[in-house]
Image (spheres, rainbow, N blue to C red):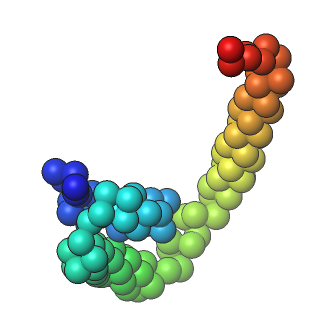
Amino acid sequence: MVPRYGDWVVLVTRLMSVARGFIALPAGVARMPFWRFLLCSTIGSAVWCTVLAIVGRVLGQHWNSVSGNLRNYDVTIIVVVIALIAFAVYRRLQGERRDRNEPATSAD
């Protein structure tokens, strides 16, 4: 049984960088028909590629000013990326520590 909005979910997730690579798995689990998946996936991918091509063309015409403006934020971007990585590591370590401290339950 395919979920009510399965077609839209496949189409929209092709526009999302993280979910794009994994949407085939839940679509398969939900037994979405292959040809419908292929059609929705193709439309979503075509939209994504078209938008990227247009943005690339516009940025390419103004690359000197764009790259100059982005250099002003190099340090900020690096600090944010490092902070996000540190936060992810902290959360993972907290989860592992919590798992070790939980008492094991026995099935009777």
Front one among 10 and 66: 10
- Percent of width and height locating residue 105: 73, 16
Q: Residue furthest front?
A: 108
Q: Is residue 48 above or below residue 91?
A: below
Q: Is residue 82 above or below residue 1?
A: above
Residue 57 visible within the image: yes
Q: Is residue 20 left or right of residue 42?
A: right
- Percent of width and height locating residue 1: 22, 55
- Percent of width and height locating residue 85: 72, 45
Q: Residue at x 44, y 63 (%)?
A: 25
Residue 16 sits in which quadrant?
Answer: bottom left
Residue 51 visible within the image: no
Q: Residue at x 58, y 70 (%)?
A: 68
Front one among 82 and 102: 102
Q: Is residue 100 above or below residue 28?
A: above
Residue 107 sits in which quadrant?
Answer: top right
- Percent of width and height locating residue 18: 49, 60
State the count of labels.
Answer: 0
Q: Residue at x 34, y 62 (%)?
A: 27
> Could you tell me which quadrant the C terminus lies in?
top right
Q: Is residue 88 above or below residue 102?
A: below
